[in-house]
């Protein structure tokens, strides 16, 4: 059972929260990066989450028509086959989907899973993300209610982002300012609209200064201790300890201390994209520089097929990204926690 069933995915998240660790959620854009993520999890003996953003799905759909649903479904089906060779369990997830792409991405994908469940099968994806951070909180939560109901009916977990994460992710951009911090009132309004599991399970991407992309130390002020305030503020009203399953967005470049604090306060999933992209590309650049006259036909020569064969540098790229995934597992304390 390499691809988690709905029940097993719920168990994974429960175990992470109880054990104060989190699963790396690795963005993939190809069969190569998928294998790199799976390999990294397997080498760390960690379960994990594989995710596809709207831009990743568009890329997977091919540049001829750039169909996001086709791309996402194709890689998910591929993952269901190849993941069987890895001795770990993974969940498939779709990353950031803003309002203008819901009808061409998340809603059709939920429908695909709903049909599978109706036929007695498991959903194709185990969770989907609704990114309403560019909307008012009222509109964000109204759409969240609709999507949560549909997701729950298809045995899918919904991820919601209620307040902005800074930087840019697949065309969704937010400034780096004081709005990047979720308040207790924001969290209370979320619990009132979406419930606390009674209307369907969801993951909450709350903001504590998070920024997508590449940044130097000191340019971003993360306050993961804020998550404790949200847990306690909502927990006190509803009589439930640590009611939220949090997601850590914009995690590239975070310190060990920031990650540890986030884990202690209920983070069960942390997204990685920027760092793994670099880890995949860096060995390729090294290969190209070292084999310049082999990968190119320089000065009338014919080059070297062995050096420009994509399998040659592709293996190094896979290894580089897999290593970064194992590091993420160690940072998030998921190493050695795979389901037996």
Image: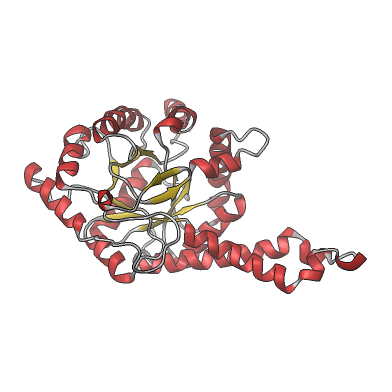
> Residue 60: percent from the left, percent from the top?
60, 42
Image quadrant assignment for residue 291: bottom right
Residue at 79% from the left image edge and 65% from the top image edge: 295
> Residue 138: percent from the left, percent from the top?
24, 31
Q: Is residue 91 visible?
A: no
Residue at 58% from the left image edge and 50% from the top image edge: 82
Q: Is residue 299 above or below residue 73?
A: below
Foreground residue among 228 and 285: 285
Residue sticking out furthest to the bottom: 290
Q: Is residue 215 left or right of residue 230?
A: right
Q: Is residue 83 visible?
A: yes
Foreground residue among 183 and 84: 183
Residue at 57% from the left image edge and 43% from the top image edge: 75
Image quadrant assignment for residue 6: top left
Q: Is residue 45 left or right of residue 322?
A: left
The quadrant of the picture occupied by the C terminus is bottom left
Q: Is residue 184 left or right of residue 218?
A: left
């Amino acid at each position: 059972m390499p691809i988690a069933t709905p029940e097993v995915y719920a168990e994974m998240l429960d175990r992470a929260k109880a054990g104060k660790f989190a699963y790396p959620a690795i963005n993939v854009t190809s069969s190569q990066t998928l294998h790199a993520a799976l390999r990294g999890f397997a080498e760390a003996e960690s379960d994990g989450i594989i995710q596809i953003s709207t831009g990743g799905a568009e890329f997977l759909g091919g540049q001829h028509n750039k169909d996001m649903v086709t791309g996402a479904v194709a890689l998910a089906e591929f993952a269901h086959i190849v993941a069987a060779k890895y001795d770990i369990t993974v969940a498939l997830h779709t990353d950031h989907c803003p309002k203008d792409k819901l009808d061409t991405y998340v809603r059709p994908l939920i429908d695909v899973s709903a049909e599978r469940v109706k036929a007695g099968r498991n959903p194709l994806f185990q969770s989907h993300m609704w990114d309403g951070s560019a909307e008012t909180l009222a509109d964000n939560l109204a759409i969240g209610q609709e999507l949560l109901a549909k997701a729950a009916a298809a045995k899918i977990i919904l991820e919601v982002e209620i307040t902005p994460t800074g930087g840019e992710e697949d065309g969704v951009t937010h400034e780096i300012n004081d709005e990047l911090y979720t308040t207790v009132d924001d969290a209370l309004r979320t619990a009132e609209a979406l419930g606390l599991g009674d209307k369907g399970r969801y993951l909450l991407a709350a903001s504590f200064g998070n920024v997508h992309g590449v940044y130097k130390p000191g340019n971003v002020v993360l306050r993961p201790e804020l998550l404790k305030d949200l847990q306690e503020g909502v927990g006190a009203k509803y009589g439930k300890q640590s009611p939220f399953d949090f997601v850590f967005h914009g995690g590239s470049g975070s310190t060990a201390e920031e990650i540890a604090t986030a884990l202690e306060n209920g983070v069960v999933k942390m997204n990685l994209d920027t760092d793994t992209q670099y880890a995949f590309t860096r060995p390729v650049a090294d290969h190209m520089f070292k084999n310049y006259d082999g990968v190119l036909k320089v000065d009338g020569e014919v080059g070297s097929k062995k050096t420009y064969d994509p399998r040659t540098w592709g293996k190094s790229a896979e290894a580089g990204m897999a290593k970064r995934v194992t590091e993420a597992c160690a940072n998030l304390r998921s190493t050695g926690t795979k389901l037996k």
